[in-house]
Image (cartoon, rainbow, N blue to C red):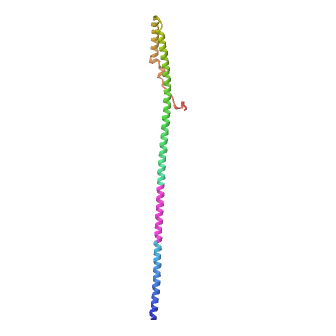
Amino acid sequence: MASSSGTSSGSSAIQNSGSEEDLRALMDQRKRKRMISNRESARRSRMRKQKHLDDLMAQVTQLRKDNHQIITSISITTQHYLNIESENSILRAQLDELTHRLQSLNEIINVMNASNNAMFAATEDHHSAANIINDSMIDNFMNPMNFSYLNQPIMASADMFQY
């Protein structure tokens, strides 16, 4: 029996060493799998970070483009506003000039009407003579060809007026 126990302890030692090698191989294999898994996880993480960075860069590019379009739009709108403001100033100057001309013409009409009333109060002889003079004055005055100053263009610019 001694020999059987000797063989059994010898085979048990071989099994133990085989079992340890198998265990080490299994542990090495698990270690390699874990290392490969960790590398793969790190690679996916880097890819996610790179995609996020690319998305942010695309967003920055789009925002810069949008900003440039807004600035251009503001510039165009400002230029339109200044053009309209300038045109408005010119129209105000023309309105003032035309108002002044209208007041002057109304004053002339009032003077003419007062002159006519005074002439009608005169005697009959003077009346007919006054009519002739008045008619010739009215004809000369009311003739559009005598209003050459009214046919002049009104020149004004935005630089003339300060608000």
Question: Among all residues in the image, which is located at the extreme right?
Answer: 162
Residue 157 to residue 116: above or below:
below
Q: Is residue 54 magenta?
A: yes
Q: Does the magenta stretch include residue 162?
A: no
Residue 37 to residue 111: above or below:
below
Q: Residue at x 46, y 86 (%)?
A: 14
Number of numbered markers = 0
Q: Which residue is drawn at 47% across and 9% down?
A: 119
State which quarter of the image contains the N terminus. bottom left
Residue 93 location (% of width, % of height): 50, 28
> Looking at the image, which is closer to me, 152 or 48?
48
> Looking at the image, which is closer to me, 87 or 105?
105
Would you say the magenta stretch is mainly helix, strand or loop?
helix
Question: Among all residues in the image, which is located at the extreme top?
Answer: 125
Residue 127 to residue 8: above or below:
above
Magenta part of the chain: 34-56
Residue 85 location (% of width, % of height): 50, 34
State which quarter of the image contains the C terminus. top right
Residue 127 location (% of width, % of height): 46, 7
Residue 60 to residue 41: above or below:
above
Residue 59 location (% of width, % of height): 47, 53
> Looking at the image, which is closer to me, 36 or 104?
104
Q: Residue at x 46, y 56 (%)?
A: 55
> Looking at the image, which is closer to me, 161 or 148?
161
